[in-house]
Image: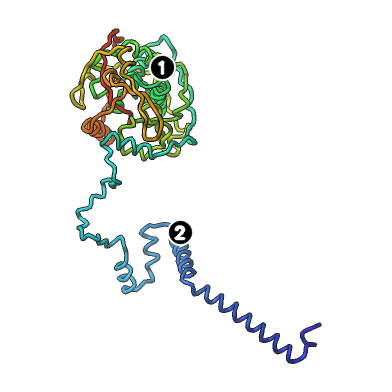
Amino acid sequence: MGLNRLPKGMRTLRGVIAASTALVLMGAAVAAWAWPGHAAKLGIERLVAETHGSLSQDALNSVTAGMTPADLAIARRHDPFLKIVPRDGTDLASFDLKGRPDLGFDPSSPDEAMRINALLPNDTAALTAAKPFVLAAGTVERARAERCLTEAVYYEAATEPRDGQEGVAQVVINRTRSPTFPNSVCGVVFQGCQFSFICDGSMAKTPVAWAWKRAQDVADHALDGYVATQVGTATHYHADYVAPDWSAERVKLIQIGKHIFYRWRGRAGDLSAFVQRYAGNEPVIQEANYRVNRFGPSQTATVSLAALKASAKTVVTDSGSTRVETVLGATMAGRKRPDKDEVAKINASLAKYEQGLGGTSAPVISAPASSSAGGAAMGQSN
């Protein structure tokens, strides 16, 4: 039945209901339009349209072109970037924006550094195996590369587990393929104080024969194409008792023994970025130039395999994992728990290098004599 056939009273009532509904809808629309959030949304959309998402000076001029002097004065008065008044009344001139915020940790303390490092989770999704690296045996280049790589493995990780030593060797190999580093094995190992055994006097001590042989075996395998998949494309690592600033700028991959391994962030850490060709011209390292401890006085000691095993103890870390530490390991080569002053010296040397003051040297060497004398190694790759 059509509307016109309804009695006059019912038609009037139907009209009142329709009119009321229309008024309600109109009121809701007006309210929505007047809602501050809606106005803010429109304001944001207008700014994006005018500036094209840019924060350039031209974009700012475009936005403020229609503002009166009074409008601009009010805007400046409320601009938090133009005037910040510290609650304690501290003069802004005393703020050092170049420093890092104090989060309540003391990174110079080995125990605190270990806690800081444990807070950063491993990113296993970022692990991608590197490509094999093969250097022909029986050549001069192979002999020099093998020597340099063995030294890196020995002095950096002599008392670390086998996979930890393989990780150190893989970092060296990865660096030879990264455009950021030298394109030879010896060039990478002896680049400035990137590996702290280069500068801490460790090379003044004759390597322990059995430990040297183990490090040499790791180096041989790496140069024969063995890939340490557990560290992927890592180009950096450090001991867990230090917390260098740069670690927050890298991707943490894994901790093996006392070493924490990292890769570059973004595309620089992807396998596709490791395109640098091996130079094939290994420098001859003048080892005598690296037998001076630039971090402070060093100690020498005689240690046997039996004594090393006798000093072993199991340590439970903050993360709940366990590992074996040795008291005599520090006098032979591996990692030891340094005191606060030693950590400060290590971090200072790394900071100096990262400011562009590190240098490179060129040149090899005579094979180590069989001896039980050892040396301390507190180092890290930065």
Q: Which residue is mark 2?
A: 52
In the image, taking residue 294 as reference, residue 34 lies left or right, namely right
Q: Residue at x 34, y 11 (%)?
A: 210
As measured in the structure, the alpha-carbon distance from the residue carrying label 1 to the one carrying label 2 is 56 Å
* Label 1 element class: helix
Image quadrant where residue 146 sits: top left
Rendered position, 160 above or below 50: above
Is there any visible trace of residue 89 in the rendered image? yes
Which quarter of the rendered picture does the C terminus lie within?
top left
Q: Which residue is mark 1?
A: 218
Instruction: Estimate how packed mark 1 is, as few (under 14), some (14 to 19) or many (20 or more) residues with alpha carbons within 10 Å.
Output: many
For this orientation, the residue located farthest to the left is: 297
Residue 368: % across, % down: 29, 10
Q: What amino acid type is highlighted by mark number 1? A: Val
Q: Residue at x 31, y 24 (%)?
A: 335
Looking at the rendered structure, the number of numbered marks drawn on it comes to 2
Which quarter of the rendered picture does the N terminus lie within?
bottom right
Q: Earlier in the sequence, mark 1 or mark 2?
A: 2
Residue 173: % across, % down: 41, 24
* Label 2 element class: loop
Between 300 and 82, the residue placed more toward the observer is 300
Q: Residue at x 31, y 67 (%)?
A: 78
Is there any visible trace of residue 357 in the rendered image? no
Image quadrant where residue 259 sits: top left
Residue 64: % across, % down: 37, 67
